[in-house]
Image (tube, rainbow, N blue to C red):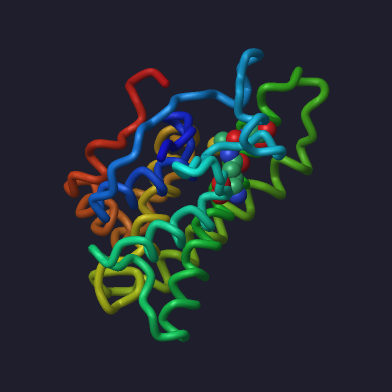
Amino acid sequence: MKLIASLTSPYARKVRIALVEKKIECDLVEDSPWAEETTVPDYNPLGKVPVLVLDDGTTLFDSRVIVEYLDTVSPVSRLIPEPNRQRILVKRWEALADGICDAAVTIVLERKRQVKQQSKDWLERQQRKIDLGVEELSQHLGDRSWCNGEGYSLADIATGCALAYLDLRHPDVDWRGNYANLVKLADKLAKRPSFAETVPPAGA
Ligand SMILES: N[C@@H](CCC(=O)N[C@@H](CS)C(=O)NCC(=O)O)C(=O)O
């Protein structure tokens, strides 16, 4: 089994963390979907990472599908609770955290265009998603130890990856100054080996 990923993708990091938590062996193949020589479209017609390639050649994407697959192939450290309501609430957390990443990535791409081609309205629209999304993460977490309340889950992984991506690409978003409960959670997550081993390389 191999995972095609870039080391800065928050979606790929979610999968890499899940692999470590679940103690599943998997080769990592680094590939940037933006590189001219990328092979990502050979595995995913959408040209996006992460992609999980199973031993029989089956390709799985996107990150939500991959994590759900990994969680069901091994009973070690269940990341998605089985009871339906808990499961759906964890998936909702994941959708919110991934949505924040979608807006954050969109801003990065828009800012790469020539200044005169950039849309201020579009940038502001994406920024609102980030700001309201992070506020909702904080409100839902409240004073609980873990996002889902019941214990460590995929909700924490997705939230931790989204906040870390903001630190990496949007240091102007002052979530650390505004939401002490998210800081506490993020600092606790950063100490887990799965998070520590998947920090994007310096300067990436
Ligand atoms: N919903 C997808 C998002 C994946 C995604 O957008 N990945 C980015 C890297 S962070 C990508 O590969 N972008 C290339 C492109 O959009 O062409 C997932 O969860 O896997």
Who is closer to the viewer here, 29 or 105? Answer: 29
* Image quarter of the C terminus: top left
Q: Which residue extends farthest top?
A: 37
Q: Residue furthest right?
A: 117
User: Image point 71% across, 38% down: which residue?
Assistant: 45
The part of the image, by quadrant, that contains residue 156 is: bottom left
Q: Is residue 90 left or right of residue 198?
A: right
Q: How many marks?
A: 0
Residue 53 % position (x, y): 50, 40
Residue 116, compared with residue 69, is above or below; it is: above
- For the N terminus, the image quarter is top left
Position of 1 relative to 114 (above/below): below
When the figure is inspected, residue 123 is found, relative to residue 176, above or below; the finding is: above
In this rendered view, identify the residue nearer to me: 8 or 136.
8
Q: Nearer the viewer, residue 66 or 95?
A: 66
Front residue of this view, candidates 133 and 43 = 43
95 left or right of 18?
right
Instruction: From the top left corner, tell me how far across and down residue 185 is, in percent.
Output: 27, 58
x 36%, y 76%: residue: 81
Q: Residue at x 19, y 49 (%)?
A: 192
Q: Residue at x 38, y 42 (%)?
A: 164
Residue 116 coordinates in the image, percent (x, y): 81, 21
| x and y percentages locating residue 87 in the rendered image | 44, 77
Ligand 1 - quadrant of the structure image: top right
